[in-house]
Amino acid sequence: MERIAVYPGSFDPITNGHLDIIKRAANMFDRVIVLVSYNPKKRGGMFTPQERVSFIKRCLSGINNIKVDSHEGLLADYVMSAGASAIVKGLRAVSDFEVEFQQALINKQLAPKVDTVFLVSSLENMYLSSSAVKEVCTLGGKIDRFVPPEIAADIKSMILRKNSKI
Protein backbone atom coordinates (compact mmCIF):
# COMPACT_ATOMS: atom_id res chain seq x y z
CA MET A 1 0.00 0.00 0.00
CA GLU A 2 1.34 3.42 -0.97
CA ARG A 3 2.23 5.71 1.95
CA ILE A 4 0.92 9.19 1.12
CA ALA A 5 1.51 12.30 3.22
CA VAL A 6 0.17 15.83 2.89
CA TYR A 7 2.37 18.78 3.82
CA PRO A 8 0.01 21.77 4.14
CA GLY A 9 0.94 25.41 4.47
CA SER A 10 0.35 28.86 3.12
CA PHE A 11 3.83 28.93 1.50
CA ASP A 12 3.58 32.70 0.96
CA PRO A 13 6.28 32.28 -0.39
CA ILE A 14 8.01 28.92 -0.06
CA THR A 15 11.32 29.20 1.82
CA ASN A 16 14.42 27.04 2.11
CA GLY A 17 12.99 25.84 5.43
CA HIS A 18 9.85 24.55 3.70
CA LEU A 19 11.98 22.96 1.00
CA ASP A 20 14.05 21.13 3.60
CA ILE A 21 10.92 19.67 5.24
CA ILE A 22 9.49 18.66 1.83
CA LYS A 23 12.68 16.84 0.79
CA ARG A 24 12.91 15.02 4.11
CA ALA A 25 9.25 14.00 3.93
CA ALA A 26 9.78 12.78 0.34
CA ASN A 27 12.40 10.36 1.71
CA MET A 28 9.96 9.06 4.33
CA PHE A 29 6.83 8.59 2.21
CA ASP A 30 6.04 7.09 -1.19
CA ARG A 31 4.26 10.28 -2.22
CA VAL A 32 4.04 13.74 -0.66
CA ILE A 33 1.36 16.24 -1.60
CA VAL A 34 2.49 19.80 -0.92
CA LEU A 35 -0.79 21.56 -0.29
CA VAL A 36 -1.15 25.31 -0.59
CA SER A 37 -3.98 25.82 1.84
CA TYR A 38 -6.09 28.73 2.94
CA ASN A 39 -5.39 29.91 6.47
CA PRO A 40 -8.23 32.08 7.82
CA LYS A 41 -5.86 33.49 10.49
CA LYS A 42 -3.65 35.03 7.79
CA ARG A 43 -5.12 37.87 5.77
CA GLY A 44 -5.02 37.36 2.02
CA GLY A 45 -1.36 36.86 1.37
CA MET A 46 1.23 38.46 -0.85
CA PHE A 47 0.93 35.84 -3.60
CA THR A 48 -2.12 34.17 -5.11
CA PRO A 49 -2.55 30.43 -4.55
CA GLN A 50 -1.74 29.90 -8.24
CA GLU A 51 1.54 31.84 -7.89
CA ARG A 52 2.48 29.82 -4.81
CA VAL A 53 1.75 26.51 -6.58
CA SER A 54 3.88 27.66 -9.52
CA PHE A 55 6.78 28.62 -7.24
CA ILE A 56 6.67 25.27 -5.46
CA LYS A 57 6.50 23.26 -8.70
CA ARG A 58 9.55 25.09 -10.05
CA CYS A 59 11.53 24.32 -6.88
CA LEU A 60 10.62 20.64 -6.84
CA SER A 61 10.80 19.78 -10.53
CA GLY A 62 13.45 17.07 -9.98
CA ILE A 63 11.63 15.18 -7.21
CA ASN A 64 9.32 12.56 -8.71
CA ASN A 65 7.22 11.60 -5.69
CA ILE A 66 5.92 15.13 -5.05
CA LYS A 67 2.59 16.54 -6.13
CA VAL A 68 1.57 20.17 -5.60
CA ASP A 69 -2.06 21.16 -5.10
CA SER A 70 -4.19 23.85 -3.45
CA HIS A 71 -7.30 23.65 -1.28
CA GLU A 72 -9.58 26.05 0.60
CA GLY A 73 -11.58 23.66 2.75
CA LEU A 74 -10.89 21.48 5.78
CA LEU A 75 -7.48 19.84 5.72
CA ALA A 76 -8.92 16.60 7.13
CA ASP A 77 -11.37 16.35 4.22
CA TYR A 78 -8.60 16.87 1.68
CA VAL A 79 -6.29 14.34 3.37
CA MET A 80 -8.98 11.66 3.41
CA SER A 81 -9.98 12.30 -0.22
CA ALA A 82 -6.31 12.02 -1.26
CA GLY A 83 -5.98 8.65 0.49
CA ALA A 84 -3.19 10.00 2.71
CA SER A 85 -2.25 8.38 6.00
CA ALA A 86 -0.22 11.29 7.38
CA ILE A 87 -0.03 15.05 7.68
CA VAL A 88 3.50 16.46 7.82
CA LYS A 89 4.18 19.58 9.89
CA GLY A 90 7.45 21.40 10.35
CA LEU A 91 8.37 22.78 13.76
CA ARG A 92 10.75 25.67 14.35
CA ALA A 93 10.17 26.42 18.03
CA VAL A 94 8.13 25.43 21.06
CA SER A 95 5.55 28.07 20.13
CA ASP A 96 4.99 26.25 16.80
CA PHE A 97 4.41 23.01 18.69
CA GLU A 98 1.56 24.39 20.79
CA VAL A 99 -0.42 25.49 17.73
CA GLU A 100 0.44 22.43 15.64
CA PHE A 101 -0.33 20.02 18.50
CA GLN A 102 -3.83 21.47 18.87
CA GLN A 103 -4.40 21.21 15.12
CA ALA A 104 -3.14 17.61 15.15
CA LEU A 105 -5.64 16.68 17.85
CA ILE A 106 -8.50 18.29 15.93
CA ASN A 107 -7.45 16.57 12.70
CA LYS A 108 -7.27 13.24 14.55
CA GLN A 109 -10.90 13.71 15.60
CA LEU A 110 -11.95 14.61 12.05
CA ALA A 111 -9.81 11.92 10.36
CA PRO A 112 -9.08 9.16 12.91
CA LYS A 113 -6.97 7.06 10.52
CA VAL A 114 -4.60 9.95 9.75
CA ASP A 115 -1.54 10.67 11.89
CA THR A 116 0.40 13.91 12.13
CA VAL A 117 4.18 13.65 11.75
CA PHE A 118 6.27 16.50 13.15
CA LEU A 119 9.64 17.23 11.56
CA VAL A 120 11.92 19.56 13.46
CA SER A 121 13.44 22.29 11.34
CA SER A 122 17.12 22.02 10.58
CA LEU A 123 19.28 24.36 12.63
CA GLU A 124 20.07 26.68 9.71
CA ASN A 125 16.34 27.27 9.08
CA MET A 126 15.03 27.64 12.66
CA TYR A 127 14.54 31.40 12.34
CA LEU A 128 13.14 31.40 8.81
CA SER A 129 9.54 32.26 7.93
CA SER A 130 7.68 33.49 4.88
CA SER A 131 6.77 36.65 6.79
CA ALA A 132 10.44 37.38 7.47
CA VAL A 133 11.29 36.88 3.79
CA LYS A 134 8.59 39.33 2.71
CA GLU A 135 9.66 41.89 5.31
CA VAL A 136 13.36 41.70 4.39
CA CYS A 137 12.55 42.01 0.70
CA THR A 138 10.08 44.86 1.17
CA LEU A 139 12.72 46.81 3.10
CA GLY A 140 15.32 46.30 0.35
CA GLY A 141 17.28 43.41 1.84
CA LYS A 142 18.62 40.38 -0.02
CA ILE A 143 16.55 37.21 0.25
CA ASP A 144 18.71 34.87 -1.86
CA ARG A 145 19.86 32.82 1.14
CA PHE A 146 16.27 32.39 2.39
CA VAL A 147 14.43 31.12 -0.71
CA PRO A 148 15.23 28.58 -3.45
CA PRO A 149 17.35 30.06 -6.26
CA GLU A 150 14.81 28.98 -8.91
CA ILE A 151 12.34 31.59 -7.66
CA ALA A 152 14.37 34.25 -5.80
CA ALA A 153 14.37 36.82 -8.61
CA ASP A 154 10.65 36.38 -9.27
CA ILE A 155 9.78 36.72 -5.59
CA LYS A 156 11.84 39.93 -5.36
CA SER A 157 10.29 41.53 -8.44
CA MET A 158 6.74 40.52 -7.49
CA ILE A 159 7.06 41.77 -3.91
CA LEU A 160 8.56 45.08 -5.04
CA ARG A 161 5.90 45.48 -7.77
CA LYS A 162 3.03 44.68 -5.38
CA ASN A 163 4.40 47.01 -2.69
CA SER A 164 4.77 49.87 -5.16
CA LYS A 165 1.01 49.69 -5.78
CA ILE A 166 0.17 50.20 -2.09
Image (cartoon, helix red, strand yellow):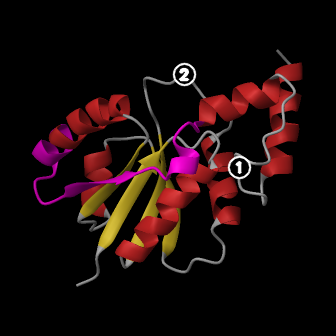
Q: Is residue 25 magenta?
A: no
Residue appearing at x 37%, y 59% in the figure: 6
Apparent side of residue 34 relative to residue 152 in the rendered image (left or right): left
Image point 70% across, 45% down: which residue? 146
In terms of secondary structure, where does tag 1 sit?
loop
Res 43 label: 2
In the rendering, which numbered label is found on residue 81?
none
* Residue in the image at 58% along x and 49% along y: 124
Name the residue type under label 1.
Val
Q: Nearer the viewer, residue 20 or 107?
A: 20
Visible residue check, residue 46: no
**Secondary element at image label 2:** loop
Tag 1 residue:
147
Please say whether residue 149 is visible from this viewpoint. yes
Lower position in the chain sequence, tag 1 or tag 2? 2
**Front: mark 1 or 2:** 1
